Amino acid sequence: MPRRRTLSDEQLLAMVLALIQAEGPDAATFAAVAKASGLSGSTLVQRFTTKAAMLRAALLYAWDRLDAETARLAGSVAKTPDGAIALLVGLSQDYGDNAAAYGEGLLVLREDFRDPVLRARGAAWGKALTAAIARCFGSASAPETIARLMLSQWQGSLTWWGFGAEGRVDEYVETELRRFLAAVPVHSA
């Protein structure tokens, strides 16, 4: 099979990310990416220099996509508690009913924690997501506190779903967030 001569950065990073998501970060070697992309290993080394740089570039690409999806969802949901639920459910849908896929995502999270640049992207996303959720509780007495608590509940519900994996993750998350809001009174200021 003849090798491809060109591939856009976005196309290549999407391929690297797909490999990471399917097989874990350790599987993203120059050889594996060369096989998946049709580019030569030397071309990949010229583009990225090191495996760590290639991994970082792919994960920054993933953060760019998550930032865009978060902004899209935040702009489309009602600024109400139901809108906050819809935003977080929307961010949870990629796992479907596959707990193993969620587990692979945790391996990617490990890489984000290890790299200070990726860790900073995660922190920035957390602040943006907190602000978006807080806007859904604008009339509450402590919207940012409610947002932080709701985000913690969301992340916890994803973990507990992974252990039980009964049904679709989006349905489980919605149920758990509704339970949370029923238990935490949201009073007007």
Image (tube, grey):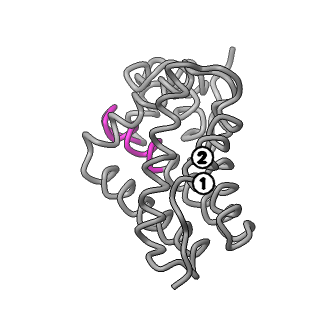
**With 34 as the anchor, is 4 left or right in this view?**
right
Report the residue at 65% width, 34% height from top: 172
Which quadrant of the figure has residue 188? bottom right
Residue 57 within the segment the image draws in magenta: yes
Q: Amino acid at mark 1?
A: Ala
Number of residues whose C-alpha sits closer than 10 Å to that of mark 1, classed few (under 14), some (14–19) or many (20 or more): few
Report the residue at 48% width, 74% height from top: 143
Measured from the top left, where is residue 140 in percent x and y?
A: 53, 77
**Which segment did they paint magenta?**
48-60
Measured from the top left, where is residue 164 in percent x and y?
A: 55, 19
Label 1 element class:
helix
Is 28 drawn above or below residue 94 in the view shown? above
Report the residue at 44% width, 33% height from top: 44
Report the residue at 60% width, 46% height from top: 179
Residue 126 within the segment the image draws in magenta: no
Q: What is the magenta segment's predominant secondary structure?
A: helix
Q: Amino acid at mark 2?
A: Arg
Label 2 element class:
helix
Labelled pair 2, 1 in contact (Cβ < 8 Å)? yes
Which quadrant of the figure has residue 123? bottom left
Residue 182: mark in rendering: 1
> Which residue matches tag 2?
179
Spatial CA span between label 2 and label 1: 5 Å
Is 117 drawn above or below residue 165 in the view shown? below
